[in-house]
Image: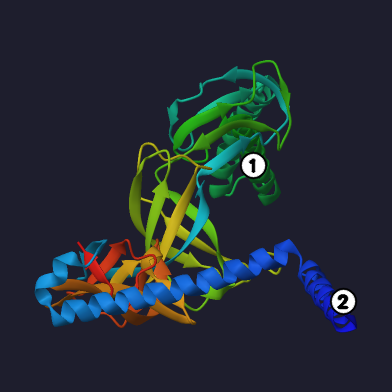
Amino acid sequence: MKSNIYFRLFFVAIIAGLLAACSAASPEDDKQARLEKLKKDQVALTKEIQKLEAEIAAANPDAATSVRAKEVSITALAPRSFDHFVQTQGLIESDNNVLVSAKTMGVVTQVYVTEGQSVSKGQVLAQIDNSVIVTNIQSMEAQLELAKSVYERQKNLWDQKIGTEVQFLQAKTNKESLEKQLASLREQNEMAKIKAPISGTVDEVVVKVGENISPGMPAARVVNASDLKLAAKVSEAFVTTIKKGNKVIVSIPELKKDIEAKVTFVGKNIDPLSRTFNVEINLPNHPDLRPNMTGTIKVVFNTEPSAIVVPVNVIQTVNNEKIVYVAENNGKQTVARKKIITVDGVFNNLAQVQGLKAGDKIVTFGYQGLSDGEVIKI
């Protein structure tokens, strides 16, 4: 009787221990463990299925149609020209974009141009009041005429040895002095005319009739858009690769087309803050180009004439190796083969690679989840 009681107590203790052990593990841990086990089982099953499918296909080619194939798209590789470039933003500038200012002070009496008008170099854009100067010029011209007449008379007398040398020299000095004063007045009169320093188009007229203007104050802006350049900054990482004469593809959004040009200037100084250097590209004449427009430039520093290029998105990284899949024939089947590659450069979503050859049929769609030797359908 006692033995039965002891047995029952022992059995109850075991059951309690088991219940305690089961309660010790949380439901979340149990689910996580089950999930990890199922994932491992799935990988093992997938590999086993692929292995059996390949063995069946090899042993019985006629049964190939019974093996499920993954649908993919392929592209046959061919050598092509491939540009290595650096891309950056730039701003269109013009050396012939001039804000014209006055050289003397006074009241503006005339404005001869309007915005959008074409002007030539030296053309008068506006006139500053010069009435006092004109009066002085007229007075000086009259004095000079008299001085010239006196000088001619004294010269004739001196040539005949009549009179004194002092009288002749005084007449000569007086004439020359008046000539210099008159030249100075005429120069002041020219300074009262605001002239175009370059040929081009009047982009802005600032000054108005009746305004008082002084030296340095802007009067008008003249722009010549026939000589434009694009200035940009490039990272110092390319300081040894960007050279004068490199081909450049300029993309201006407003023009909706690309312009081909060349690098015309490469700066020698590295900006200590941005760690960049300046480059400039002379632009061809185009009626729609304007100063201060922005554009994207691609400076081509290397061109491979015969490169193997693939879309960058088809390259996968597995175990620290770059791989792609190519389609190969295996009897009556087409299978995916893993190819290990090296990437020489990525530009414009394309990658130049080593490890592939012309004619390889690279998988460009459906490559995710492929395995080496897996049967595919094109």
Q: Image height check: is 230 above or below 122?
A: below
Q: Which mark is residue 259?
A: none
Could you say where residue 150 lies in the image, as x and y percent from the top left?
A: 61, 35
Q: In the rendered image, is residue 305 in sight?
A: no
Residue at horizontal 38 percent and vertical 72 percent from the top: 46
Compared across the picture, whether 348 is left or right of 134 comes to left
Could you say where residue 13 lies in the image, as x and y percent from the top left?
A: 85, 76
Which mark is first along the chain, 1 or 2? 2
Q: Nearer the viewer, residue 196 or 117?
A: 117
Q: Image height check: is 161 above or below 109?
A: below
Check disc 1 and give the amino acid type.
Lys
Q: Which mark is residue 9?
A: 2
Q: Image height check: is 135 above or below 167?
A: above
Check disc 2 and give the amino acid type.
Leu
Q: Quadrant of the N terminus?
A: bottom right
The residue tagged 1 is 180
Residue at horizontal 44 percent and vertical 31 percent from the top: 119
